[in-house]
Image: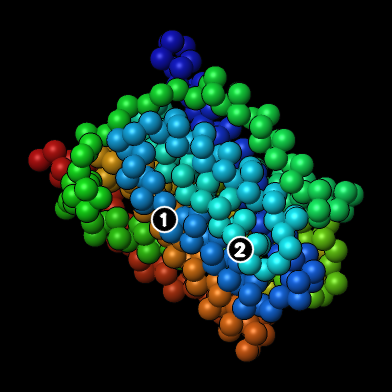
Amino acid sequence: MTNSDLINKKVLFALFLVHFSGDFFQSFTKPLLPVLATKFSLTLTQVGLIGGLSMLTAFFIQPIFGYLSDFHSRRIFALFGVMLGAVFIPLVGIASGYGFILMFICLGSMGSAIFHPSAAGMVLLYTPRHAGLSMSIFGMGGTVAFAIGPLVLAGFVTLFGLDRLPYTTLIGLLFLPILMVLLPTSEKSAHKNHTLLKTLKDSLGDVWKSIMVIWILAFTRALLEQTSFTFFPILFASEGYSLISIGSIISLFTVGGSISSLACGHMADRFGFKPVYYFSFALSSPSLYLFVQSVGWLTYVFSFLSGFFVFATLFPSVALAQKVAPKSRSLVSSLIMGLAMGTGGILMPFIGKLADAYGIRAILNCIALMPFLMLIFVRYLPDPKETMDSQVN
């Protein structure tokens, strides 16, 4: 093993920790929704607004920070973003009203918008080989956090009460010195002093159609994920599931996702990206439909399977986009991961309104059919090798 390989593995581990520590606090938001809905007598529309605004500030504005981090210090952006979430998300526990809930959620979620593109942009910079696997290892930090976080949140609130949630900020403070030691400074993009629009033009160029196809599929996957995280807890709470049970269901959903994101990153490197997309989108619809219909122990089974298939293309899509448009890795990552997730998230109030009108189970059944409809777009996914060859020629 060369010294360069050791450095790359150290950096990849550091980026894994950035993703884990940042998303650990972001994972608190969705399991808190049933508690907040009960405490403040919120409607499903208000619940959807919380979910929508959290996605808007966590993901929709990511391209702005992706653009900035491409010609500033990605390290500073990553560290600051992690701490912003660690400070403000737990303050929801002492919020005195709906307005304060929205304020704390938005400020904390903005930390996600700051650290995600900067950290993702560093992955292929330091670990260019096995791009799909490296991006999935980085991504697994987030999915593991979303698997563990809801259980920690549920246990903490059950044992100590919602008003003591701000004490969990201490966990984030424990990660900070470790990240400051391990996380390297990174190279800056060649796009310095370009405007955002100019950078987009230089980065995408002739590949914008390919990026658009990747984005449409990423948006569909994000809509499935955010609808599941936002409304499945409400559905199961209405059916008498305890907070611990709901936290376990969400954790199993993300555990399935963490396994598939790692496995499918390796599959994408070995077999190509299209087979992974066909596998994910073809099987997401039946697993989500059965998840909606399930009762008893089958709920936990289909929670795991739904997460496994829904998350399968999350990080391979980012790796594919960076290969197709490598000039601004942070910016492109923010478009595929951030803008897609944010666009899906801002639809949550609309979906909540439909759920108020027609019933939450009926709406979830409809959402479950979307992956089948999107399979046609998989055919038009780009081959990164052909794209790179055309750019050279």
Q: How many marks?
A: 2
Q: Earlier in the sequence, mark 1 or mark 2?
A: 1
Q: Are the residues flagged by discs 1 and 2 in contact, CB closer than 8 Å?
A: no
Kindly identify the residue that appears in the image at 34 percent across and 42 percent down.
Answer: 68
Query: Given this view, does label 1 or label 2 mark the residue nearer the observer?
Result: 2
Q: How busy is the neighbourhood of tag 2: few (under 14 within 10 Å), some, or many (20 plus)? A: some
| Looking at the image, residue 266 lies above or below residue 150 | above
Q: Residues within 10 Å of mark 1 (few under 14, many from 20)?
A: many
Of residues 350 and 193, the one drawn nearer to the viewer in this rendering: 193
Tell me residue 130's x, y (percent): 41, 32
Instruction: Look at the picture and state if 227 lies above or below 87.
Output: below
Q: Quadrant of residue 368?
A: bottom right
On the picture, is 207 further left or further right than 150? Answer: left
Q: Residue at x 30, y 35 (%)?
A: 71
On the question of residue 319 being in view, the answer is yes
Question: Which residue is most to the right?
Answer: 159
Q: Amino acid at mark 2?
A: Leu
Q: CA distance from mark 1 to mark 2?
A: 17 Å
**Image coords of residue 152 (percent x, y):** 77, 46
Q: What residue does disc 2 label?
A: 102
- Residue 370 image point, x, y percent: 49, 73
Query: What is the quadrant of the C terminus in the image?
Result: top left
Q: Quadrant for residue 82, please give it.
A: top right
User: What's under tag 1, amino acid-wise?
Assistant: Ile
Residue topped by disc 1: 61
The reply to whether residue 138 is visible in this rendering is: no
Q: Residue furthest front?
A: 96
